[in-house]
Image (cartoon, helix red, strand yellow):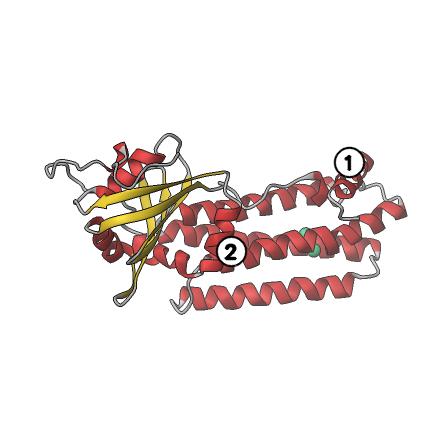
């Protein structure tokens, strides 16, 4: 919906100063969580993958409370993660919101610099002028497990499903501005579960004599090394959990399942091993052909 610059949308109408608080924000996490917005390329990818978006122009009247009204007024119909991009002559701001809560803010003002978190939110709340707004409803997941990811073995498919679920939990806990301890727990469960899963696959390779086990094992090892190194730096406060880290993890898992894990699935299938679920194999091959993977 287009809204003229001279008309203030309902959501942005001045509010009485008596209304506390001026906005809702994830108080315990907004400072560190705002670093999520560090990578413009990945934020734009989030936008590309958005479920829905609308663009409109608005005039920010520079009244305390305008951010709250921007967030609650335009976007409150549905709960879930959203991205708001505000572009004006003298500002460029990105906000992540979850429901009606602001979970991350990055504000860039030419000649002033870049600010994050509460400082950015305060500055934005008092900013006056016209802005172009892009409001996007983000996908609440990175990707889902589908039959194309099947390795034709029920137990391992279930482990892969669970891995995808944990990746999605990590993504959503970041966007929702969960407290750091919660995000840390999800990250730890991802690391632990990945190790357990790799061991399960490798045991099967040994048991049935899968010929490309060594190369596969090396891939597992190198992933575990990278993740462990990141985790140590993260725990020491030297590295942030950013969208690019999340992207690396989720892309690696998906590509590894689609290529390397698929390879052992096919090998087991051709060997006619009893652990293979033939129905799952047929369904997976069909799905892969449809997606142009084979
Ligand atoms: Fe796997
Ligand atoms: Fe694997």
Residue 130, position in %: x, y? 27, 48
User: Residue lying furthest right in this view?
Assistant: 271
Q: Which residue is drawn at 56% across and 67% down?
A: 226
* Residue 91 falls left or right of residue 142: left
| Residue position marked by numbered label 2 in the rendering | 246
Residue 258, position in %: x, y? 71, 51
**Mark 1 CB in 8 Å range of ligand 1?**
no
User: Residue lying furthest left in this view?
Assistant: 18
Q: Between residues 293 and 177, which one lies in front from this camera angle?
A: 293
SS of the residue under disc 2: helix
Q: Between residues 254 and 13, which one lies in front from this camera angle?
A: 13
In the rendered image, is residue 23 in sight? no
Q: In which quarter of the image is residue 60?
A: top left
**Contact, CB < 8 Å: mark 2 with mark 1?**
no
Q: In this view, does 158 lie above or below 226?
A: above
SS of the residue under disc 1: helix
| Residue position marked by numbered label 1 in the rendering | 283
* Figure quadrant, ligand 2: bottom right
């Amino acid at each position: 919906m287009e809204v003229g610059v001279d008309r203030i949308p309902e959501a942005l109408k001045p509010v009485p100063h008596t209304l506390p608080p001026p906005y809702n924000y994830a108080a315990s996490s907004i400072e560190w969580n705002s670093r999520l917005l560090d990578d413009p390329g990945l934020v734009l990818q989030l936008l590309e993958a958005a479920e829905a978006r609308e663009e409109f122009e608005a005039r920010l009247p520079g009244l305390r409370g305008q951010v709250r009204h921007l967030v609650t007024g335009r976007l409150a119909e549905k709960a879930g993660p959203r991205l708001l991009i505000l572009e004006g002559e003298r500002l460029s701001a990105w906000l992540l919101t979850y429901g009606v809560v602001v979970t991350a803010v990055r504000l860039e003002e030419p000649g002033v610099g870049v600010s994050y978190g509460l400082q950015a939110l305060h500055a934005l709340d008092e900013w006056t002028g016209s802005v172009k707004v892009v409001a996007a409803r983000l996908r609440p997941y990175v990707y889902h497990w589908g039959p194309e990811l099947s390795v034709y073995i029920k137990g391992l498919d279930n482990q892969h499903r669970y891995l995808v679920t944990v990746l999605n939990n990590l993504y959503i806990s970041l966007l929702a501005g969960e407290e750091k301890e919660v995000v840390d727990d999800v990250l730890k469960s991802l690391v632990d579960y990945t190790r357990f899963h790799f061991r399960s696959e490798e045991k099967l390779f040994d048991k049935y004599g899968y010929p490309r086990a060594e190369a596969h094992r090396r891939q597992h090892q190198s992933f575990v090394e990278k993740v462990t190194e990141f985790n140590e730096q993260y725990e020491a406060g030297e590295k942030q959990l950013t969208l690019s880290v999340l992207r690396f993890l989720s892309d690696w898992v998906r590509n590894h399942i689609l290529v390397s894990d698929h390879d052992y699935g096919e090998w087991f299938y051709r060997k006619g091993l009893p652990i293979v679920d033939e129905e799952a194999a047929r369904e997976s091959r069909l799905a892969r052909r449809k997606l142009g993977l084979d």
